[in-house]
Amino acid sequence: MLLVLASCLLLVPPASADEPALEETSSGAPSAIMMLPATEAMSPKGSSMKPVVFNHLLHERKIEDCTACHHTGDPQKCGECHSLEGKKEGGYVTLERAMHARVITSRTGGVVPNSCVSCHERQLKQRQCAGCHSLVKPSRDDRWCAVCHTVTKDMTADQLRQAAMGTLPDEEREALAVKTVLEKRYATPLRPEFLPTRLRLDSLSHKYGPNYFGHRRHVASLMSRIEGDNLAAAFHTDPATLCTACHHNSPASATPPPCANCHGTRPDPTDPGKPDLKAAYHLQCMGCHDAMQVARPIKTNCVSCHKPIHQ
């Protein structure tokens, strides 16, 4: 009997693992939504963009009124009015512009629409990160686009084709969107204790003594401004991105070259748009302090940063 029972148990298929899931939204809308451009012909040839998985749960928690995005007052899909080609129902605004417009004309007597980009840029100005980003403008390259335009690797080419044609079942589409959100990993933040404590800046110390720049303290201060911020974490996918706040023309790296590699001690007549080293230091340091509203040191008082050399 034991042998028979054992053989029967072997024939029973193992229990399948639970499908990944997100919490439900309070509105009843899907927690994660996969968006693709809608074309009039519903042909995948009319679409070249990668899918966008929108974390509806996260965004719904951040806003009080659904009309912030669903500006018509009807929580319908964006693609119903805004198609790839643009159509009358959407005021001939294409889906690409509806999602990426940076400047949107104000309206009277109605809700002013938001695009994904315009909303994010407004947040950028309102948060603490505005200090850095008043000087450092995001490079709108493939890496920047990939923050939103990405999908789980488990999505097959056939599923992508079906999604672009509008024939992928809603349940399958939502499951892939949820899986994409759950797979998202944020970059490990920089550890200030592994970075230089102080930097001696003495290339120009003929009139004043060297400046001892509190490098680790500055990095820790910037890190504290982005930690716990989902918007910042989503776009700072490389932990060294933070370094580009100062090392603005170097690739993102925790060991960037010194400023003098690009900025000479004298102006370069062949490149009048590039400041010399003294101007570069002062524009960067003072510009950042102004943007961050740092009261000290006082930028009009040289000895706030430099000790004078007595001759």
Image (cartoon, rainbow, N blue to C red):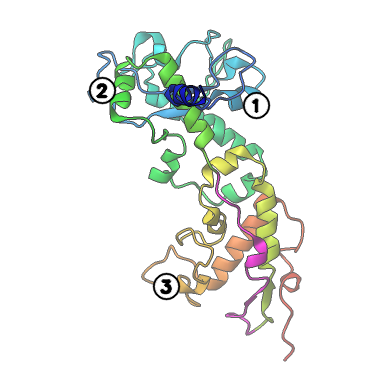
Mark toward the start of the polypeptide (2 vs 3): 2
Judging depth in this view, the residue of 283 and 123 nearest the camera is 123
Mark toward the start of the polypeptide (2 vs 1): 2
Mark in the foreground, 2 or 1: 2
What is the magenta range? 186-206
Using a 10 Å C-alpha cutoff, classify the residue at mark 1 as few (fewer than 14 neighbours), some (14 to 19) or many (20 or more): few
Q: Which mark is residue 44?
A: 2
Q: Which residue is mark 3?
A: 268
**Can you say whether 306 is above or below 274 in the image?**
below
Classify mark 2: helix, strand or loop. Answer: helix
Mark in the foreground, 2 or 3: 2
Q: Which mark is residue 62?
A: 1
Q: Which mark is residue 235?
A: none
Q: Residue at x 49, y 70 (%)?
A: 257
Q: Marks 1 and 3, Cα distance to the nearest angstrom?
A: 49 Å
Residue type highlighted by circle 1: Lys
Residue 45 locus on image (x, y percent): 23, 24
Residue 81 visible in the picture: no
Classify mark 1: helix, strand or loop. Answer: helix
Residue type highlighted by circle 2: Pro
Labels 2 and 1 touching (C-beta < 8 A): no
